[in-house]
Amino acid sequence: MVDLSRFSLQGKVALVSGGSQGIGLAAAKAFAQAGAHVVIVSRKMPDLEKAAAEIKSMGGCVMPISANVGKPAEIPSMLSKVKEMYGRLDVLVNNAATSPAYASILNAEERLYDAVMNLNVKGVYFLTQAVARMMGDTGGGSIINVSSVDAFNPQKEVGIYSISKAAINMLTKSAAVELAPFNIRVNGIAPGTIRTRLFEALFSHLSSDEAEKAIQNFSKRFPLKRVGIPDDIAGAMVFLASDASMYMTGETIVIDGGCLLVSALNEA
């Protein structure tokens, strides 16, 4: 018989980087609904305050912290605030990342490479390191890395982004092996196309009606015939954060509406 109480996050403390919008905000809301105390982190405090107000309106407990996790020097101060408030950290979601900028492997500039890698890989690595030290002192926890389907099937002209997310998949496996003795599980989620502000910005040159039509046409390429929404990712976040996934580590769950299946069939 399934014990549904294992999906509860009651009393746990969860930190979500990039938590002011999109997938990060959806995860933070879901964690709060499941009973967690949520810490949301991003660079812009006005965005964080808006997100925090949404979570509080649902009856959730939330603490916003402004920090750039792509700069490892800012991580200790951020975590000291968490430790001062809660004394522990049970869940980390490494969600903060740059959006893919279009540039081919022949003309991408070094500054683009550094910007993507510093946040998408370096920031994740050192935030994971710092949080794992906290978790190790308090009995363990769960770390969830946000990857991408581009890590498995790269698109043209977003090679740096694809490489960074492939690195996240290996970081998930490497960290899972090394942190298991400390009762720290490390898993990942690889979303497909998700309807966020960044995605909709791709259609900003069109009128609202034209943009919606273009998005619907774009959706037809997927088996489920729609673009995902952030809430489509939130359920898996709760599962990986909770005791329901106690025997799972080192894995990356693909949530993409079947788009990788279509790619495989087209290449067959």
Image: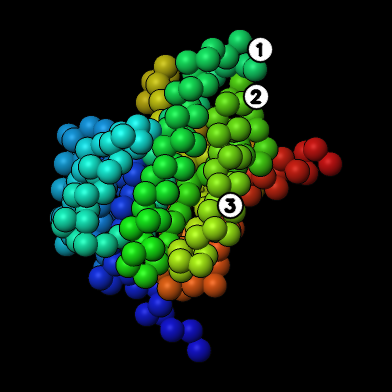
Which residue is painted at 78% across and 44% down in the image? 265
Depth order, front residue of 193/90: 90
- Tell me the quarter of the picture where residue 106 sits: top right
Can you name the residue that lies furthest to the bottom here?
1
Q: Is residue 7 left or right of residue 170?
A: left
Which residue is painted at 78% across and 38% down in the image? 266
Mark with earlier residue (1, 3): 1
Looking at the picture, how far across and down is residue 214, in whole percent? Answer: 51, 28
Say which of marks 1 and 3 sits in front.
3
Q: Does residue 79 lie above or below 197 as drawn?
A: below
Q: Which residue is mark 3?
A: 174
Mark with earlier residue (1, 2): 1
Amino acid type of the residue that numbered disc 3 sits on in the rendered structure: Ser
- The answer to whether mark 1 and mark 2 are in CB contact below 8 A is no
- The answer to whether mark 2 and mark 3 are in CB contact below 8 A is no
Depth order, front residue of 208/146: 146
- Work out how far the residue at label 1 is from the one at label 3, CA to CA, in angstroms: 31 Å
Q: Crowdedness of circle 3 by 10 Å Cα count: few (<14), some, many (20+)?
A: few
Q: Does residue 117 lie above or below 8 as drawn?
A: above
Q: Crowdedness of circle 2 by 10 Å Cα count: few (<14), some, many (20+)?
A: few
Looking at the picture, how far across and down is residue 155, in whole percent? Answer: 64, 29
Q: Residue 236 has which mark?
A: none
Q: Crowdedness of circle 1 by 10 Å Cα count: few (<14), some, many (20+)?
A: few
Looking at the picture, how far across and down is residue 228, in whole percent? Answer: 48, 46
Q: Which residue is mark 1?
A: 106
Depth order, front residue of 101/43: 43
Amino acid type of the residue that numbered disc 1 sits on in the rendered structure: Leu
Q: Is residue 15 visible?
A: yes
